Amino acid sequence: MEMETELRLESSLWVGNKRYRAVLSGWHFNWTEVDKKNRDKKTISVPVAEVVGVEEGRVEILPRKSVEDTDKDFTVFYVKRSSSGSSYGLLWRLGRIQFSCPSRVLRDQWTKHLRTALKTHSPLRPNRLLVFINPFGGKKKGRKIYHSLVAPLFELAGISSHVIVTERANQARDHLLKKDLKGFDGVVCVGGDGMFSEILHGLIGRTQQEAGLSENDPTVALQPCPLHIGIIPAGSTDCVCYATVGVIDPVTSALHIIIGDSQPLDVCSVHQASALMRYSVSLLGYGFYGDVLAESEKHRWMGPLRYDYSGTMVYLSNRSYAGIVQYLPADPLLSSPRDRTRCLSGCSVCSRTTERLFPHSSVYSSHFNQFSSDSEGEWVSVEGRFRCVSLTCMSSSCPKSPLGLSPSAHLADGTGDLILVWDTHPLGFLKFLYRHTSTQDQFDLPFVEVHRVKAVRFSLPSGKEEEAYKETGGLRGGIDEEERGYIETVSRNGSQQHLAERDTGQEMTNEQKMATPFLCGLCCSKVPAKSVWNCDGEILSSTEILCRIHGQLVRLYARGIEEGAAVHNCGKENDKCQMGCTLIK
Ligand SMILES: CCCCCCCCCCCCC/C=C/[C@@H](O)[C@H](CO)NC(=O)CCCCCCCCCCCCCCC
Ligand SMILES: Nc1ncnc2c1ncn2[C@@H]1O[C@H](COP(=O)(O)OP(=O)(O)OP(=O)(O)O)[C@@H](O)[C@H]1O
Ligand SMILES: [Ca+2]
């Protein structure tokens, strides 16, 4: 209360030849035109935390910076929302208003008060940032995007940045692992998901090194990273940006960085035996998504289109894979992947997790070992043939799928959603895939299940590779030793526990399979016995893995999807949708 009184300031100010009543009080700065009739009176109210900067004089930064140094004027830059052209979240733009004061004294009072209020209300604003630009990401526009759209905003906000344009893959990761990071408040990544992953690995690794913790041990409670990560999207796939900001837009992301927004993010560590393989934040997928990635690597020249092409090819190859999936369910009382809620900015499920993980607010050392000490249930085991097995720590929404792989997943609840798609008829699987592009529930299918989990183990059924997959058109004759790694097992086998009760009603007979025009088996002589894991766009070298979700291990300069953001169920952008489809709020 005292603070509010201290920061309150109210006076008449001029904007051009119009008189305004401006008020700075508590968390808001607002201004209302005075001489308007009551019904035309409009107040513009800006949360102090969203004021980008306050400058003396009449200042413009676009198209280039110009300052008219008058001693009774000041300019306020702030976040202005715009919904046009956005398919999911809101676009943020730089708003600007130039005020004139009756005296210099009053002008100085306004600038001083506004600057003090800024510091008080957004303590996480960065002063100094380490920026990595991948010059080859996406359309190779990383440098241009940073220098023309982002750097002027950082300068305006008084942020100093140390920029490194990478010369090789993993340079950013290695820098974060080894170099002096003193004085930096955050790390900015200008690139796509691959570049973000480098930063993620570098920062997590560095933090554990300094804490003396072993990343290889899946039971260790990892130390959350002290530096925030900012993502300026400049890749061909920017899923992490899309899922945490709601739009893929460099200016919006730069503004989130400047005002010091903070969005914690769950991270999944993937281990083989007792070695860490990689970390994942979005998609850890075996089967379909692994195959799509492996196939797409052969067609990199196609750019982002390679995923559609490879997706179609892999879909047509009609594969399923045998596996044993074990998972540790999360507390079902806290939330469920089918509860039809969405994790939006200020999400209450994630806030409760923050309180649980960090009971004394930002004292990070109190992070406890949720893997072993949190009230945990029993591991559940299922075995059978799967079209795909996916684990996602967040919704993994992306332009292709605006609500994502798991629309009700949370960014920072300390859990992931495990999606099991059992072997089924090709048209059933197509239905499942297609539902990702609309608001239809992709989990409401008899061959799909979803579980909210804290850990997952995947293994191959022993000895199953020995059996031959005969119904692939009979083009393959006897199976010799060389082909061992490419033999598919005979059929989906009932799993011991849960599968015994399952009847998806979708099982195909061999005759049906033969009649399906999509079977790769009709033209290919080799069908792999196992798939690969897609870990946020990287292929893992092991099949048998143990994954564990670490709640809120990193924090991004973001705030999640803002309420009020609209999604068309056709997945198109607002102004491009001419289908008259429903708008989901
Ligand atoms: C019929 C339409 C079906 C549309 C199905 C859309 C499902 C889209 C789900 C996308 C989930 C992306 C999750 C994020 C993963 C990122 O961490 C990672 C790194 O960037 N990206 C990929 O691994 C890249 C993986 C990209 C996977 C794309 C799969 C595209 C499938 C297209 C299937 C077409 C079948 C057509 C049959 C006639
Ligand atoms: N200077 C560089 N030269 C080559 N590769 C680099 C360089 N800097 C970063 N990389 C690597 O490039 C990969 C892809 O980068 P990024 O994610 O920024 O772009 P992208 O276009 O979205 O990627 P992709 O084509 O894989 O979808 C990253 O894995 C990163 O490690
Ligand atoms: Ca989560």
Image: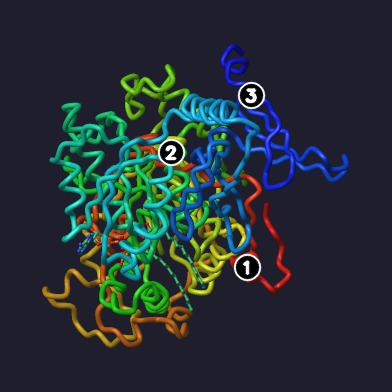
Distance from Cα at disc 3 to Cα at disc 1: 47 Å
Q: Position of residue 80 (x, y in %)?
A: 59, 48
Q: Earlier in the sequence, mark 3 or mark 1?
A: 3
Q: For the residue with label 2, is its CB less than 8 Å from the closest atom of ligand 3?
A: yes
Q: Is residue 204 among the parts visible in the rendering? A: yes
Q: Nearer the viewer, residue 45 or 363?
A: 45
Q: Nearer the viewer, residue 190 or 59?
A: 59
Location of mark 3 (residue): 9
Which image quadrant is residue 441 in? bottom right
For this view, does 197 lie left or right of residue 84?
left
Q: Residues within 10 Å of mark 3 (few under 14, many from 20)?
A: some
Pick out the residue farthest to the top: 2
Q: Is residue 187 positioned above or below 287 on the image?
A: above
For discs 3 and 1, the disc positioned in front in the rendered view: 3
User: Label 3 is placed on what type of residue?
Assistant: Leu
Location of mark 2 (residue): 415
For discs 2 and 3, the disc positioned in front in the rendered view: 3
For discs 1 and 2, the disc positioned in front in the rendered view: 1
Location of mark 1 (residue): 570
For this view, does 504 lie left or right of residue 35?
left
Give the secondary structure at mark 2: loop
User: Label 2 is placed on what type of residue?
Assistant: Thr
Distance from Cα at disc 1 to Cα at disc 2: 29 Å
Q: Is residue 490 among the parts visible in the rendering? A: no
For this view, does 437 lie left or right of residue 238?
right
Colour scheme of the picture: rainbow
Q: Is residue 190 positioned above or below 54 on the image?
A: below
Residue shown at 47%/46% (left/top)? 255
Q: Position of residue 145 (x, y in %)?
A: 37, 61
User: Label 1 is placed on what type of residue?
Assistant: Cys
